[in-house]
Amino acid sequence: MKHYNIPIFLPELACPFQCSYCNQSKISGQLCLPQVDEIKSLIERNIQTFPQIERKVEIAFFGGNFTGLPAKTQISYLDIAEEFVQKGLVQGIRLSTRPDYIDVSKLELLKKYSVKTIELGAQSLDDEVLSLSGRGHTSQDVFDAAGLILNHGFRLGLQMMIGLPGDAFEKARATANKIIAAGAHETRIYPCLVIKDTQLEKLYQQGSYTALSLNQAVEWTSELLNLFELGGVRVIRIGLHPSEELNGSGLIAGPYHPSFKELVMTSLWRKLFEKESNWPKTRKMKIHVNPKEINFAVGYMATNRKWLTGNGLYATFVGDKELKERNYYITSC
Ligand code: SF4
């Protein structure tokens, strides 16, 4: 069963805060809340692009602050999404929102619909980082909202950002551990970027904020990914989707890379190869990995293969469906 999301981006219009790094219109390339008709045709267009069998489709309201929208708007969006669920064309609805916009009455409204997953932009669970980033809520707000969401029977997603003002690797690691402890089912890891026309851009131009380097962001993310995997939290996204704005003048600074996830996975595989001590004496070998991992094991731009070759190790990568995640074995040839 393959999972597909139909993403519907809601810009920050519903959001009374202005997080220092946020300019949703630059990230999503969209300024106005979509009309119900636009959402309907977007869903219809997307559905046709998915395979007809072995699929699980969810309508995903991303971006701004869903539960901060007027109830009337939430209902109009949920009504249209629910129509597709009732027709059996999609299997559920998911949405993202702010932790301080969750309460019992908001959850009871969502419970009337086929909302399965609620994602909170936790970003950091360090109160100093939250305050310096202008988030307008505390870590306790996240824990309270997470508990309510779980108690109401929703799946919980807690997104995190790395490299926010005041952040450090130890704080990011503590955030990941708290996300695991809070009972999240899934997470996303986004490196903080300096986007045009944001408070962070001013801080960056004044020299008060330094973005993570690409290398730092890759290393931090690979460590966090290991932690989440051990903690049983699914990492459903690493890095922002490429957009025209991010590829163009909207990005001022920061560790953006269109293949960020590949870089992270490449780094994880490289570390495994660096630790490997049982290379075959022939120096020519097959490295067996799960087929989904082959590209990552070979590395972005074949960097891992080149690294092996540079160390006199001549590897062919072979798929083995029985292997899980980054398990592998080597045979000589
Ligand atoms: S809460 Fe979300 S939408 Fe609102 S300003 Fe912050 S990042 Fe942007």
Image (cartoon, rainbow, N blue to C red):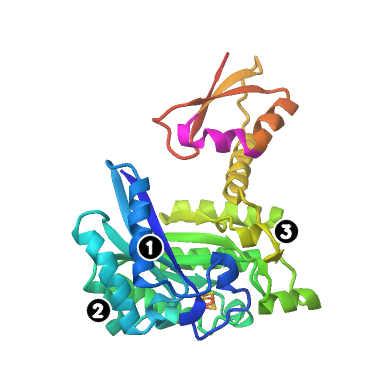
Residue 108 — which label? 2
How many discs appear?
3
Separation of marks 1 and 2 at Cα, in angstroms? 19 Å
The magenta-colored residue range is 289-300
Between discs 1 and 3, the one toward the N terminus = 1
Is residue 118 in view from this perspective?
no
Element marked by disc 2: helix
Give the image location of residue 86, x and y in percent: 19, 61
Look at mark 3 in the image and give the residue it sits on. Answer: 213
- The amino acid at mark 3 is Ser
Give the image location of residue 148, x and y in percent: 32, 77
Residue 107 — which label? none
Mark in front: 3 vs 2: 2
- The amino acid at mark 2 is Glu
Look at mark 1 in the image and give the residue it sits on. Answer: 60
Neighbours of disc 1 within 10 Å: few (<14), some (14-19), many (20+)? many
Between discs 1 and 2, the one toward the N terminus = 1
Front residue of 214/194: it is: 194
Mark in front: 1 vs 3: 1
Between discs 3 and 2, the one toward the N terminus = 2
Give the image location of residue 171, x and y in percent: 60, 69
Neighbours of disc 3 within 10 Å: few (<14), some (14-19), many (20+)? some
- The amino acid at mark 1 is Ala
Mark in front: 1 vs 2: 1
Separation of marks 3 and 2 at Cα, in angstroms? 43 Å
